[in-house]
Image (spheres, grey):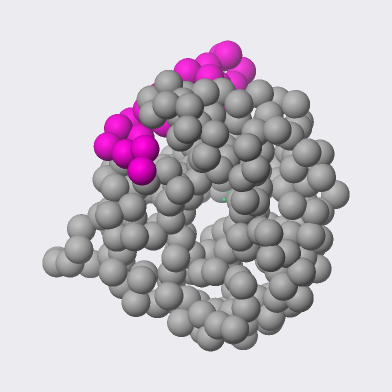
Amino acid sequence: MQRRSLVAANWKMNLTVPEGGSVAQGILGAASKRADTDVVLCPSFTLLHHIREVVAKSNVKLGAQDVFWLAKGAFTGEVSVEMLRDHGCEYCIVGHSERRGRFGASELPNELLAYFSDSDVVVERKLRAVLDGGLTAILCIGETARERNEGRTDEVVASQLKIALSSVDESEIPCLAIAYEPIWAIGTGNVCEPDEAQRVCELIRSEVGAHMGSDAANTIRILYGGSVAASNCAGLFKQRDIDGALVGGASLKPDEFSRIILSA
Ligand code: 13P
């Protein structure tokens, strides 16, 4: 089955308005050559307004990095799905390991990590809100280095997936992409070998099939994320069960991200 490629940039907490505008401008050319690929920029909330204007006449879509699951109310600092839609977002990342408080290499002291603590249940609620609000969700799952060393990769990934998907209906699969992001590969330059990334993405696809049937498994888009660069993306994109990438650091460099878009 031919699935449409998806290449998404997660800018994390980087770039000012002028910097973000110039990075976005710098990838429009590459994106315009790829009518067969969804290219999505996920800047910080403060940049959404400006980046929306920069990409307005292009095929580049806008996404957010996180969301709160309730519609409105006394939730200081939070942002709702409707607010994201207001700003032109069509995508939203949900359950990124950094929001789950599961870091690979982090300079944060342990007592501060507790402030980033989306549990599997919170991730499930956010996913529900994003789908109910008519956006496309990019659901992130992945294991820590320790879990991998203990041979628990498959169990961790399957469990995160099961909880997140518990209320997802097969009809919603076109509005969902899953990003396999091994935490030890994020921001480390230590990319997962393509064979191993393929093995886990195949497992994810078969878990989706077990929960929702073979049509859902064949339709769902699965991305790889973690130290994706122009120099290593071709090997990943060749894999049968990898339909694109969620790119962090390399997406801040327009030339590098353009090369990734062109090889998807
Ligand atoms: P890097 O590409 O910087 O490793 O980040 C990956 C990531 O976390 C994307 O969401």
| Location of residue 49 with respect to 210 vertically, above or below | below
Looking at the picture, does residue 135 appear above or below residue 113? below
Most common SS among magenta residues: helix
Seen at 72% across and 73% down, the residue is 32
* Of 78 and 236, the residue lying toward us: 236
Residue closest to the far right: 231
Q: In which image quadrant can residue 124 be found?
A: top left
Q: Can residue 117 be seen in this view?
A: no
Q: In this view, does 35 lie to the left or right of 148?
A: right
Residue 236: % across, % down: 75, 39
Residue 221 versus residue 131 in the image, above or below: above
Image coordinates of residue 251 in percent, x first then y, are 68, 62
Residue at image point 39% right, 60% down: 135
Q: In which quarter of the image is the N terminus?
A: top right
Seen as rendered, the residue at the extreme top is 151
Q: Does the magenta stretch include residue 161?
A: yes
Q: In this view, does 138 lie to the left or right of 118?
A: right
Q: Is residue 262 magenta?
A: no
Magenta region, residue range: 144-171
Which residue occupies 69% across, 65% down? 35
Asked if 210 appears above or below 8 in the picture, the reply is above
The answer to which image quadrant residue 191 occupies is top right
Q: Residue at x 74, y 52 (%)?
A: 264
